Image (cartoon, coloured by chain):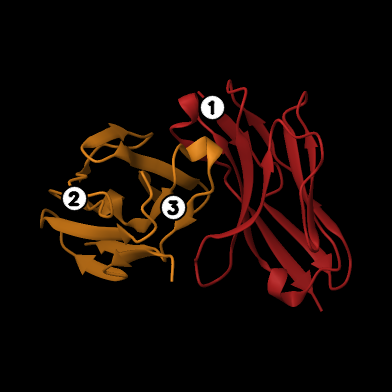
Chain colours: A red, B orange
């Protein structure tokens, strides 16, 4: 079974500081995307960033970047200059069998301390 | 505006009373999927559809049915709801395969089965 592991159920960061959320995955696919989604208190699922596995360059979206280690099947999310609005649940996702499914981790709850 | 809509957003029902949660997307996406979210378990896939009249089970399909008669709609049917189906449900769509395209999520449906 394909699995996604987020080892940090909860994390906190001081406003304006940097925090890294970890994620490991297990897929048999060779060509795939990896995703980080944010879920604020509204419960809406919002795409934060995605990484194409065949690209060696780590994806970056403004204050959000990833550290993608394909051989280790690791896909961590770094949030720089943390803001109060970053407080949310964050989910990592990778493809399941045959890319027909997306498998999610159990999430990391991020708190931002003013 | 490109979006995925779900209705109803909130639903309280009783055990055994059939219900349908509708999902519609206006992006001409081929792939659609249903997830349920429970505390501490992340998102788990219920069913997915690769295209019209093509559906398949996800990880937790028991007690649910789906249909895909039109490309834009993918309703979730609970024929005889039970309390263990109390959850937050998300519909999502992507252009094609889940592992190779960004999935766009609906706003979620909170279901309480008494």
Give coordinates of residue B76: x percent, y percent.
24, 51
Seen from this angle, which residue lies furthest right?
A: A17
Q: Secondary structure at mark 1?
A: loop
Relative to B38, A110 lies left or right = right
Label 1 neighbourhood size at 10 Å, few (<14), some (14-19), many (20+)?
A: some
Q: Residue furthest left?
A: B17
Where residue A29 appears, as percent x and y from the top left, is 58, 23
CB within 8 Å, label 1 to label 3: no
**Residue A89's image quarter?**
bottom right
Where is mark 1, residue-wise? A2
Residue at 61%, 27% (x, y): give it. A31
Mark 2 belongs to chain: B
Quarter holding residue B50: top left
> Which chain is home to disc 3?
B
Vertical order, B76 against B13 (above or below): above
Above or below for A104 versus A91: above
Mark 2 lies on residue: B78
Which image quarter: residue B25?
Answer: bottom left
- Badge 1 vs badge 2, beta-carbon distance below 8 Å: no
Quick one: SS at disc 2?
strand
Give x and y (percent) for residue A60: 78, 53
Q: Would you call the spot at circle 3 few (<14 residues within 10 Å), some (14-19), or many (20 or more)?
A: some
Mark 2 vs 3, N-terminal side: 3
Residue at numbered disc 3: B37
Tell me if label 2 and label 3 are in contact, CB under 8 Å: no
């Amino acid at each position: 079974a394909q699995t996604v592991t987020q080892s940090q159920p909860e994390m906190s960061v001081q406003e304006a500081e940097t925090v890294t959320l970890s994620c490991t995955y297990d897929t048999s696919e060779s060509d795939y995307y990896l995703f980080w989604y944010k879920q604020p208190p509204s419960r809406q699922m919002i795409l934060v960033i995605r990484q194409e596995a065949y690209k060696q360059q780590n994806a970056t979206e403004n204050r959000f970047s990833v550290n993608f280690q394909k051989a280790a099947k690791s896909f961590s999310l770094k949030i720089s200059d943390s803001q109060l609005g970053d407080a949310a649940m964050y989910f990592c996702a990778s493809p399941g069998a045959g890319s027909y499914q997306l498998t999610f981790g159990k999430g990391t709850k991020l708190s931002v301390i003013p | 505006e490109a979006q995925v809509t779900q209705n109803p957003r909130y639903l309280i029902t009783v055990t055994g009373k059939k219900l349908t949660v509708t999902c519609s997307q206006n992006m001409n996406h081929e792939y659609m999927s249903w997830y349920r979210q429970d505390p501490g378990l992340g998102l788990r896939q219920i069913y997915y559809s690769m295209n019209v009249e093509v559906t398949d089970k996800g990880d937790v399909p028991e007690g649910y049915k789906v249909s895909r008669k039109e490309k834009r709609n993918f309703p979730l049917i609970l024929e005889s709801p039970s309390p263990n189906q109390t959850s937050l449900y998300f519909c999502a769509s992507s252009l094609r395969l889940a592992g190779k395209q960004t999935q766009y999520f609906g706003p979620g449906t909170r279901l309480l089965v008494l």
